[in-house]
Structures are given as structure tokens and as C-alpha cells.
Image (tube, rainbow, N blue to C red):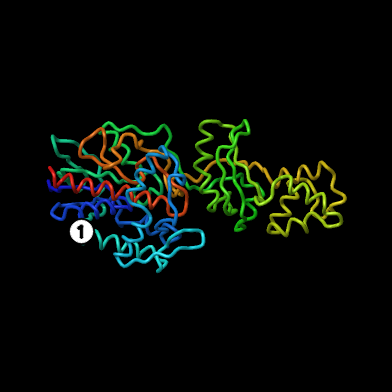
């Protein structure tokens, strides 16, 4: 059996950050990070289209779901965006802000971020071991034993940063949840894919518009019509259904709503800058202009013609020939079309996981378990998931920082 002061289970974004800060906090501690994947940081490398969206210019609790806003805010305040920028700059990685507020490395290469993190871990004295899947962790008096087919470690402190269930090929297959429950932790009732594309029937007209993208407003409404959540962003039509930033952001709310109300629906407003009354007025003023000539000024023509078909209004109809019923159908189609979602693409394609270990089971000043002294949890294993745009990385940096510093200090003081 090998020994270590701190064993970090999972060497993704949160795990690497926790290991780095544990080493920086306690330079004499022996810190080992174990990861089941043969390649460290696979999820970092595929994030942001291979560019790694490190964070966002403005991060607060409003961009997250899962736990309470107050609890999320408490963690985020401990390591904020400015600290993230400063940290990466100290490693030689400058970040640039894009028009949508996302921050990427100037190199536009996720490899730049991963290389810097691995170098920082090495400098901090962290030993990283790939292809070391942890099968179980047990408590033995004041220490832990971390088991795997590769052998075992005795550790004074353990940091669980195993991720959720999203993109399991990178190593985050949900096994960390079973480890957490061994120490008395509970899991949220639902653990579902988040930031995931949605599936439509293959004969739906949007599946025939593959590659088309439009700025829309997406809404999740309960059967009663009550609005649960809405996002305005781009939606991408694909061969299987819909994707793009707007869809990814709304997906977890739609999936969650369907668990509560099977009749909850997803609706799209194709011209979000105009109200239904605005559109009604514009249609009434078309006179000799045709519906398609008006619509093509606002939407791609292929989409515009499809919306006319869905409304059962010929695209070449001049305004003066539109009946009240025609206008009503057009307005309904344009402003509140229900999308017949049949499912989602699952954890294999989800960028993050919604659900996990509730934050109220952790001491948020340290990320230490309230159920087991010496055990810390951070990252996606916790019941927190953010919007697309670097928010989930910021959650990983903040939680990893807190857990790493706390574990490092705890080793010094024990």
C-alpha cells in the first residue's frame, strides 16, 4: 500500500485545481491525483469546440441551477472571475473576451489550458496517475484507503472530484456518486443530462433544415401555460432535432419539467424582438406585399416558407388577402410554436450533469463533507449546473480552490 497525505479522485478541471491549490497551500504534503481515463483532461480538451471556454466575464448564481442561489453564490465568491484570469495569466495563459462575454485562451487552443494546469500541478508537487480508476474508498480510523485494480493508497484526506455522468468516455461515468453514498451522502431525486441536444420526430420539418441557425426565444411551459424558464439565443437545426446554445441552456429545465409535469412543453418564438401584437399589426399593414416577402426580411427563407406551410397560409399570399384566421395562425406559429420533443441525446452528448450531492451536505467554507470528516467534494459531483458559456468551468475552479486549500491546511494542522 502506498501512502499520501491527500488523494484527489478525478483529475478533470475541479480535481486538477484542487490538487494544485492543495500543493500550493502545503508544499510538504504528498498529493496524488487519480483518474480513470487513459488521457488526463479529455473533457477540457473537447470543451468550447476544442478552444476551452475558461470562464465568462460575468458569473453569478443566476447562471446556475440545482442548489440554492445563496449556497452557489457563497462558493463562487471565494474564487471569482478576476482571480481566474489572474491565475491563468500567472501560468502564461492570457484570456481574451469575445462579444458574447465568453473568455477563451488567446491561443484558441484547449491544449494551452490543459498544459498550463498540468505544469502547475507538477510545480505544486502533485503526482498524477492516469488509468487509475478508483473502485472504492473506505474509512479506517483517521485515514482513508483508496482502492483500485492497480492497488491502493492510504490517505489522510480525500477529495472527490469525479464529475457527474456526462461524456462518460472521458471518465465521468457517475461512479463517484456511489463512492459519496458510501459515506452517508444522499443524491438528488433526479440526475439528468444538462446542456444536451434535443430530439424531434424524424419527419418534423426542422430535421429537414439541417445546418440552419436562427436567433430565437425558447420557453418551457407547464400544461397550465405557466412559464417556467426562457432563454433567447441561437438554435441550430440538425438531422436529429435541435441544438445550439439556446437549446442547450433550456434543455435541463425542459427535462426536469417533464419529470414534474409530463404535459410540459417546449415552445419557440421565431421573432423574439417582436411581440404577438407587433406581428399582428405588421401583417395587417402588408397590403400588396406578400407574407414571404415580409418574413424573409426577418428569417432565413427556407425557414420562412416552412412556417407558412405550418400555418397553412400560402407564402405568396398578399397581405390584403389574409383573413383574420390566417393572421391568427401565423402569429401563433411565429410566436409560440410547440416543439414535439421526443427525448434528448443523453449523457453521451450532454456537456454537464444536473443533480448530484446536495450542497447542504457540505461545509461550503471548506467543501468538506458534513457526513465524513476529511472527505471533500467539488465540481460536477455536486448538485450544481450552469449555463453554456464558461460557467461550469468557473464552478469547477471555485470549488476546487476551496477544497484544495482546505485539505492542504487540514493536513498541516493534523
Residue 215 image position (x, y, % from top left): 61, 54
**Going by the image, does 311 lie left or right of 240?**
right
Q: Nearer the viewer, residue 31 or 309?
A: 31
User: Against 39, is 310 above or below?
Assistant: above
Q: Nearer the viewer, residue 2 or 118?
A: 118
Residue 120 image position (x, y, % from top left): 25, 61
Residue at 31% across, 67% down? 92
Q: Nearer the viewer, residue 184 or 404?
A: 404
Judging by the rendered image, the residue that carries numbered circle 1 is 124
Q: Label 1 neighbourhood size at 10 Å, few (<14), some (14-19), many (20+)?
A: many
Determine whether the residue tagged by mark 1 lies in a helix, strand or loop. loop
Residue 167 image position (x, y, % from top left): 40, 49
User: Against 90, is 263 above or below?
Assistant: above
Residue at 83% across, 42% down? 324
Residue 41 in which image quadrant:
bottom left
Residue 64 image position (x, y, % from top left): 44, 44
Residue at 20% across, 54% down? 23
What is the number of callouts on the image? 1
Amino acid at each position: 500500500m502506498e501512502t499520501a497525505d491527500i488523494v484527489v479522485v478525478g483529475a478533470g478541471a475541479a480535481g486538477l485545481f484542487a490538487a494544485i491549490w492543495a500543493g500550493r497551500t502545503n508544499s510538504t504534503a504528498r498529493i496524488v491525483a487519480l483518474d480513470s481515463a487513459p488521457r488526463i483532461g479529455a473533457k477540457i480538451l473537447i470543451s468550447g469546440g476544442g478552444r476551452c471556454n475558461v470562464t465568462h466575464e460575468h458569473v453569478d448564481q443566476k447562471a446556475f441551477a440545482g442548489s440554492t442561489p445563496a449556497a452557489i453564490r457563497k462558493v463562487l465568491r471565494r474564487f471569482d472571475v478576476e482571480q481566474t484570469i489572474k491565475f491563468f495569466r500567472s501560468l502564461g495563459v492570457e484570456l481574451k473576451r469575445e462579444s458574447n462575454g465568453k473568455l477563451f485562451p488567446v491561443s484558441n487552443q484547449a491544449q494551452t489550458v490543459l498544459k498550463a494546469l498540468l505544469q502547475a500541478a507538477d510545480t505544486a508537487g502533485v503526482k498524477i496517475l492516469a488509468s487509475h480508476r478508483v473502485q472504492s474508498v473506505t474509512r479506517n480510523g483517521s485515514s482513508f484507503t483508496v482502492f483500485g485494480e492497480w492497488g491502493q493508497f492510504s490517505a489522510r484526506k480525500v477529495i472527490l472530484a469525479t464529475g457527474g455522468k456526462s461524456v462518460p468516455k472521458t471518465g465521468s461515468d457517475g461512479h463517484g456518486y456511489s463512492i459519496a453514498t458510501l459515506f452517508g451522502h444522499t443524491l438528488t431525486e433526479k440526475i439528468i443530462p444538462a446542456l444536451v441536444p434535443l430530439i424531434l420526430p424524424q419527419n418534423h420539418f426542422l430535421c429537414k433544415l439541417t445546418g440552419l441557425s436562427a436567433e430565437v426565444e425558447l420557453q418551457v411551459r407547464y400544461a397550465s401555460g405557466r412559464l417556467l424558464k426562457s432563454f433567447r439565443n441561437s438554435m441550430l437545426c440538425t438531422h436529429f432535432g435541435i441544438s445550439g446554445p439556446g437549446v442547450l441552456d433550456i434543455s435541463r429545465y425542459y427535462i426536469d419539467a417533464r419529470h414534474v409535469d409530463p404535459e410540459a412543453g417546449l415552445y419557440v418564438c421565431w421573432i423574439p424582438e417582436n411581440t404577438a401584437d407587433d406581428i399582428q399589426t405588421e401583417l395587417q399593414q402588408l397590403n400588396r406585399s406578400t407574407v414571404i416577402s415580409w418574413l424573409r426580411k426577418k428569417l432565413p427563407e427556407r425557414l420562412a416558407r416552412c412556417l407558412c406551410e405550418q400555418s397553412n397560409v400560402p407564402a405568396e399570399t398578399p397581405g390584403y388577402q389574409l383573413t383574420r384566421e390566417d393572421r391568427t395562425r401565423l402569429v401563433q406559429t411565429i410566436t409560440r410554436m410547440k416543439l414535439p420533443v421526443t427525448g434528448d441525446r443523453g449523457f453521451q452528448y450532454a456537456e454537464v450533469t444536473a443533480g448530484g450531492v446536495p450542497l447542504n451536505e457540505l461545509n461550503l467554507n471548506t467543501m468538506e463533507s458534513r457526513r465524513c470528516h476529511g472527505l471533500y467534494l467539488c465540481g460536477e459531483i455536486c448538485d450544481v449546473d450552469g449555463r453554456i458559456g464558461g460557467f461550469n468551468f468557473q464552478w469547477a475552479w471555485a470549488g476546487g480552490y476551496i477544497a484544495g486549500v482546505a485539505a492542504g491546511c487540514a493536513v498541516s494542522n493534523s
